Image (cartoon, helix red, strand yellow):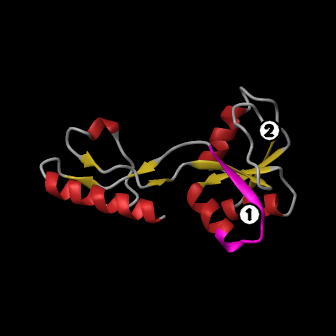
């Protein structure tokens, strides 16, 4: 079994049995306050902080072609982009879920919310002929997910 930030590849399902996803490592749009934007597709205006040269910048540049205009604020790191949001220099930050979760945990008094933008599911991969092991892994992951 392989279990290490492994992204499900639909083209490999004949060669690999994937467990149900246990984590989404996609992008989130983080905003100040307790209410996230309704949708990234409708636009949100203002300034969006992100890491320069990141996948998030590529995604934001795609958005500029289909939603109301906004300003991209590039920063050296994703944490710096979140700092800009938290300190009021931006209306939103576009980062990966791992960075957002870690940053929000480090700033528990900061009221923020996140809107899921992309889905990058992580899963365990097993040989397809290991059905008993796959069932045990799926049970264990179900218990872990139920436990939070």
Kind of element beneath mark 2: loop
Q: Is residue 2 visible?
A: no
Kind of element beneath mark 1: helix
Residue at 64%, 60% in the rendered image = 100
Q: Nearer the viewer, residue 1 or 64?
A: 1
Q: Is residue 13 visible?
A: yes
Q: Which residue is mark 1?
A: 80
Q: Nearer the viewer, residue 133 or 63?
A: 133
Q: Quadrant of residue 112?
A: bottom right
Dot 1, how many residues are within 10 Å of its Cα: few (below 14), some (14-19), or many (20+)?
Answer: some
Residue segment shown in magenta: 105-116
Dot 2, how many residues are within 10 Å of its Cα: few (below 14), some (14-19), or many (20+)?
Answer: some
Asked whether residue 45 is drawn in magenta, I would say no
Q: Which residue is mark 2?
A: 44
Residue 39 relative to residue 133: left or right: right
Residue at 80%, 58% in the rendered image = 85
């Amino acid at each position: 079994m392989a279990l290490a930030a492994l992204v499900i590849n639909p083209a490999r399902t004949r060669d690999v049995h994937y467990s149900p996803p246990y984590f989404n490592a996609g992008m989130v749009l983080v905003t100040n306050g307790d209410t996230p934007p309704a949708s990234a597709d409708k636009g949100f205006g203002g300034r969006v902080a992100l890491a320069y040269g990141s996948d998030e910048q590529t995604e934001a540049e795609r958005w500029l072609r289909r939603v109301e205009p906004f300003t991209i604020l590039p920063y050296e790191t994703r944490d710096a982009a979140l700092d800009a949001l938290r300190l009021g220099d931006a209306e939103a930050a576009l980062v990966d879920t791992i960075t957002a979760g870690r940053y929000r945990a480090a700033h528990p008094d900061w009221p923020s919310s996140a809107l899921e933008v992309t889905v990058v599911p992580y899963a365990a991969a097993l040989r397809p002929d290991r059905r008993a092991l796959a069932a045990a892994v799926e049970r264990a992951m179900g218990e872990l997910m139920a436990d939070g």
